[in-house]
Image (spheres, rainbow, N blue to C red):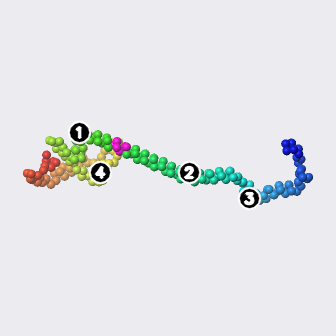
Amino acid sequence: MHPDAPRPPRSSGDPRGGSKPASRQGRAGTAAKPATGGTTPTDRSGWLSGIRFSGFSLIMMGVLVLAVVVLAPTIAAFAQQRQQIAELRAAVSQQEEEVQRLRDERERWNDETFIMTQARERLYYVMPGEVSYLVIDDRTEAAKADATAAVSAEVTESKGDWMRTLLDSVMTAGLAPAPTAPAEVPAGAPVGMGER
């Protein structure tokens, strides 16, 4: 027979002279179905043995593993560097805000009115001819805590005897001990805040 010539169609029987016996087909069909409904060891080994690796697929898997091994540290270093860059940018923006705040404060210190206000508040300086009074807060800690409480919008009326309160105030002021005379200041001593 010539290699380019078309082949005749095969018959359903075996070309070697006989058809397959029906008993073999019946046995093969029943052997493929497990009786218990689960997988048998022969089924598991069957699909494992059906996996075939070509040389190309093995080479590609090796290249893939090599790429993961080479690129994983690089990607981790890249992510760490991106995090460091974000932290440094936040630190730079915070420092820029601090620089701007200091510039604004420097500009305020160039204003003469601001300097005078700071001298009055911080150092208790007064202008010539002025008298400075220093009020000392002698309230208890509980009274100071009450002062920081939120102010109510509702009008409340205190239930107190104003006549009794007035009498107590007059009696306290009248029975207070007499003030002592101030000590004599030597002629060469510096003058204090209240004696200007």
Q: Which residue lies under the disc numbered 1?
A: 112
Left or right of 170 in this view: 31 = right
Main secondary structure found in the magenta portion: helix
First-in-chain label (1 vs 2): 2
Left or right of 33 in this view: 152 = left
**Residue type highlighted by circle 3:** Ser
**Depth-wise, is mark 1 or mark 2 nearer the camera?**
2
Q: For the view shown, which residue lies furthest in the left direction? A: 187
Q: Secondary structure at mark 1?
A: helix
Residue at 43 percent across and 45 percent down: it is 89
How many C-alpha atoms fall within 10 Å of the one at disc 1: few (<14), some, or many (≥20)? few
Q: Which residues are magenta?
A: 96-101
Q: Which residue lies under the disc numbered 2?
A: 71
**Depth-wise, is mark 4 or mark 2 nearer the camera?**
2
**Residue type highlighted by circle 2:** Leu
Report whether residue 154 is seen.
no
First-in-chain label (1 vs 4): 1
3D distance between C-alphas at marks 1 and 4: 34 Å
First-in-chain label (4 vs 2): 2
